[in-house]
Image (spheres, rainbow, N blue to C red):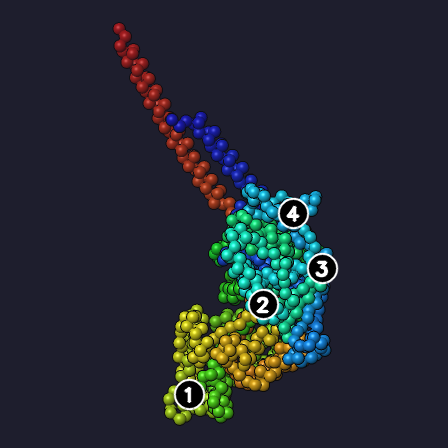
Amino acid sequence: MLSLERLRPAVCGGLLALLLTTLSACSQAPVNSPYAQHSAGQNVLYTAFSQRSPKYLDPASSYSTDETPFTYSIYEPLYGYDYLARPYKLIPRAAAGIDQPRYYDERGRELAQDVPGEQVAVSVYDIRIKPDIRYAPHPAFARDRTGEYFYWPLKPGQLKGKFGLDDFEHTGTRELVADDYVYAFRRLASPRVVSPIYGIMAEHIVGMRDYGEKLKEEEAARRAAPEAERQQWLDLRKQGFDGVQALDDHTLRIKVIGKYPQFKYWLAMTFTAPIPWEADRFYHQPGMAEHDLSLNTWPAGTGPYMLVESIPNRRHVMARNPNFRGEPYPCSGEPGDQREGLLDDCGKLTPFIDRVVFSMEKESVPLLGKFIQGYYDVPEADRGEYGVAMRVAAGDSAEKAALYADHGLQLRSTTEAQMYYMGFNWLDPVVGAGDTPEQHEKNRKLRQAVSIAFDWEQFVAIFQNDQAQVAYGPVPPGVLGYQDAPAGINREIYTVEDGLAVRKPLEEAKRLLAEAGYPDGRDARTGRPLILHFDSMGGMGSSAMLDWMRRQLAAINIQLEVRATDYNRFQDKMRNGSAQMYLWGWVADYPDAENFLFLLYGPNAKVTYGGENASNYHNPEFDRLFEQMRFLDDGPQKEALVHKMTAIAQHDAPWMFGYFPKSGGAYQAWVHNAKPTQMVRNTLQYMRIDPALRAQKIRQWNVPVWWPLWLLGALGLAAVGLIWRVAQQRDRRTALAAAAVQEGAQRGKEESQP
């Protein structure tokens, strides 16, 4: 039975508990924080990944964008890129400087630096390496007092319970030496390592292909040996090849076939990062694979960070490499970098951040939600579309624009070294080169007419939300040879008014169309309407975009027929030259005009030579200039040749040049030195955060809403009051009934007495 005496303690206890809960909540960090208390005030950068954990952290195998925040922070290639400079500028990382190669002819005689490229048989790069660069602590280097390795060879049971580097009690380090780069190049050729870059390196480095074939033959012979012998570590120190040598501990020599100035850019990629033989041997022991211990999961590098925690598809953490020497932050950049505060840390040693935490977020909505709440400093370190998407969202919604402004979010964008273009097949009789000089000129005018009618400014506004730059030529911003308006404007398609490009009117396109033999869009000889064919690969173009394209050409009375197909069939059409018009793109491997202009180089034609010249374009003068330009180092002479080649391509119009897409970063107000780029990969090294401001903003943006609890408490008190009243009434009725019964019993007792 519920009594008032029992109810009073319960009510008081409930009220006290509610009061304590409220006071406690008010005094603590936001209750929705996904991190430990006080973590917001630490010098830790929080970001996310959405696809999967990085699969390959072995630099020989890694080729995926989502792996680069790790590989370029952990490993050090010889070269890198200036973080702020545009056009992109090569700078030394582990190397002491950018050393120019020496050139030799077939007889071994040294040639002058300005020798024509076709006379060069071998280019010799002698690269000096900075002294006192040390590897991050790693168990592969651990030795006892006698100099013996702790973990080589492993004793039975020594791997028990070990699934990460922190499970190993002992670690060690040593200095980086030139032989580590030699070992790395040899690993690229090893049949035990799957490297997407080996084929390219073997084309250019003296003796590398023969070395790879020799290793392959030895591996095939080894398959017939007993299991224990087959599984032995392949010690690549025992045999090498002439193309990559260590002259001493701090000098690396690389011999390149012919003259190939672009080779220096490959030395800025982590494919060519150093690999210590001790780490290769350490991981190639029985049981390591079963414990998921390898260079793919636990790297060994000399870079600013080291991997210290790895929970697949959940969380990965990099911490500052205690052995990293520190590198100064740049002191110059693009115009506007000073205004953006990007030069405030000039000369200070990087990295600035102690730890970087990557957390799994499978869906973009909760990821962006946590970013808005302040729990992520950068949405995803490896992806550039968030800044672009949020800029578009702010343009579409005044509410979101106000929210982003209130939070002080930095939504920066940059035009990347990549492009999309609409190509004409040079082998096609209608839009191609033509089989006579007269037909060649008519087809050129047809391509120019189509290019004028195809309004790329409108395309970018509608389908790229203005987050792209219309291209006037094949070379994008950030690459030597690019010309901004007005100098770079394509005068075949535009007129120039007040320094701006104005697309020529449709009347001009119709005039060119008539001169091409298609007045009013009909063949002058047969009277048949002109029908052009656009081959669309699967996923490239929505129905709305294709309808828009049809309307563009309909404006000059040309019919566009879309032939949609899957990607495999599209590839077949490109290989055999049966496509007429197509839309394709290209992302630069390195910031050199050669990496774009070779897409129009005749000997790279896809049909004839299987190259990347998908339009099969051929112009003898363009090819002649390309062959000069490809051997030149950066400078005025090379830039002038790029401009000439661009003018030829503009005149011939094998492409409608399309657009250069933008990428953008989204950064919290407390993130400093943030500059979006997809060419510079070691960006985490340069970022700096203000943890105190982050902690303040997180408290401000995530103030707990307690009124529902107060309302719930009030309703609870009301319910308690009601129960109390009901209990009182029931107790009163019970007491009255008991009194009546007692009174009746007493009366009956009295009446029963004589």
Query: Could you say where residue 609 lies in the image, as x and y percent from the top left?
Result: 51, 78
User: Is label 4 in a helix, a strand or a loop?
Assistant: loop
Neighbour tally class for label 2: few under 14, some 14-19, many 20 plus, Cα within 10 Å = few
Check contact, mark 4 vs mark 3: CB within 8 A. no
Q: Residue at x 42, y 82 (%)?
A: 532
Q: Is residue 355 above or below residue 657?
A: above
- Name the residue carrying label 2: 210
Whichever of labels 4 and 3 marks the residue nearer the N terminus, that label is 4
Q: Residue at x 43, y 74 (%)?
A: 572
Q: Name the mark on residue 164.
A: none
Check contact, mark 2 vs mark 4: CB within 8 A. no
- Name the residue carrying label 4: 149
Left or right of residue 714, residue 598 in this image:
right
Q: Amino acid at mark 3?
A: Asp
Res. 200 in view: yes
Distance Cα–Cα, label 3 vs label 2: 26 Å
Q: Residue at x 52, y 66 (%)?
A: 392
Q: Nearer the viewer, residue 31 or 293?
A: 293
Q: Amino acid at mark 2?
A: Asp
- Name the residue carrying label 1: 521
- Name the residue carrying label 3: 249
Q: Nearer the viewer, mark 3 or mark 1?
A: 3
Q: Amino acid at mark 1?
A: Gly
Distance Cα–Cα, label 2 vs label 4: 34 Å
